[in-house]
Amino acid sequence: MSIRRGLLALLTQEPMYGAQLRTEFESRTGGTWPLNVGQVYTTLARLVRDGLVEAAGAAGDEGRINYRLTEQGETEVQRWWAAPVDRGDTPRDELVIKLALAVTVPGVDIQRLVQTQRTATLRHLQDLTKLKRATSDEADGRGPGQQKELAWLLVLDNLVYAAEAEIRWLDHVESRLAREATRAPKARTRDTARLYDDRSERVSR
Amino acid sequence: MTASPILLLDNVSRVHGHDETAVRALDGVTLTVHAGELVAVMGPSGSGKSTMLNLAGGLDQPTGGKVIVEGADVGAMSLRDLAALRRRSLGFVFQDFNLIPSLTAAENVALPLELDGLRVRKARRIALDSLEAVGIAELADRYPEHMSGGQQQRVAIARALVGNRRLVLADEPTGALDSQTGEDVLRVLRARCDAGAGGLLVTHEARHAAWADRVVFLRDGVVVDSTGTPPNAESLLDSAGAV
């Protein structure tokens, strides 16, 4: 996540000081990406250095400095809205790596691995759903125009869809491995053999 | 909480065919649904999900174990008692809504009550309460063709839980709906369960199963995992011992 661009985008609304930027960032993303004040000030210092942000006057009574966008900063934000987010740089996912290794390393009960993960991910999905329900009930109670709640709900939806995608992928892995095991019984490895045997054992029990 | 479950599947099996051609659609499944609880069942096609719902609703009979609805053993019932159970205790919700097109929303919901001998006016009053509970009281006199899919599915939920009916068996209820409408339907189902109904929901969409208190995974007719334990295991033992 680009904190840098997030802060620039917030500053298009109005000049803000560091702690305020942090609060605004977190309330709009529902605290999904918590920032510490240090990160915010380090980022602000770099933005000032790069000429994208400047101090709007001297420090106030409490020593706070309000920051505002420069013209160059404004251009940078507009460029960000206009351009797609780069997906080429895929983050490493431990589950994907774990599964790839489980398929190739002997002695792993892959079916159990998949089921354990699916249950855990579904529990996570249940938690997200509860959170979503509580947030939307709260927003409904306060009437229309709850833009920050809306933003948080959309962030939650993103997490919901991501968890769902993971479960669908696990379903796919399971059926793909089962098919592999039935299709080539002679060439199967010890581990896919076990996957297959587990299944037939269950059926006959 | 010591109340017995609304639905209890006690070591239930369903075998189709005999000997070497026998297919075990369900193999020793135990599951409870209590009042106030929504339980989701997930699993690949052919895992036994639909068999489970059909058994729970008395549309099919187990070849082993017992199905208990509101304390009554479904397997031991005469056809007549079974029909009465389906009118009085439980309702189905399907993917394709299954409303009767020539009846209004209120008439659809009132139908099981009228079939059970209630007078039309009284049945209508109860039906209106049920429509109110799913948030569409104002659509009472509309025909299904003049309602959206989401509205029709709410009518189906209202019908499933009209009057004293407390068990809703939902088979892919969001299958024909877009994602937002599907979620709204789940929200209604969830709210009805929070208000005291018991729900058994079959779905292949994890996003929708996540509205349930518990998600049970079926594979090859066997429960392979669950996201939680029933709220009161003791009462499960009590009711299992009592039958």
Image: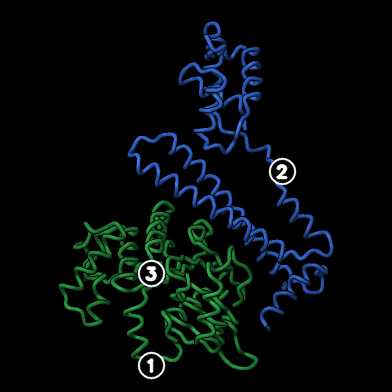
Chain colours: A blue, B green
Do pointers 1 and 3 mark residues of a single chain? yes
Q: Position of residue B197 (x, y in %)?
A: 39, 68
Q: Chain of mark 1?
A: B
Judged left or right of residue B22, residue B79 is: left
Q: Chain of mark 3?
A: B
**Dot 2 lies on which element?**
loop
Amino acid carrying mark 1 in the image: Ser
Judged left or right of residue B113, residue B222 is: right
Residue B78 - label: 1
Residue A92 - label: 2
Q: Nearer the viewer, mark 2 or mark 1?
A: 1
**Dot 1 lies on which element?**
loop
Q: Nearer the viewer, mark 1 or mark 3?
A: 1
Judged left or right of residue A91, residue B156 is: left
Taking the spot 59% from the left edge, 68% from the top edge, the residue there is: B217
Taking the spot 45% from the left edge, 85% from the top edge, the residue there is: B60
Taking the spot 46% from the left edge, 75% from the top edge, the residue there is: B5
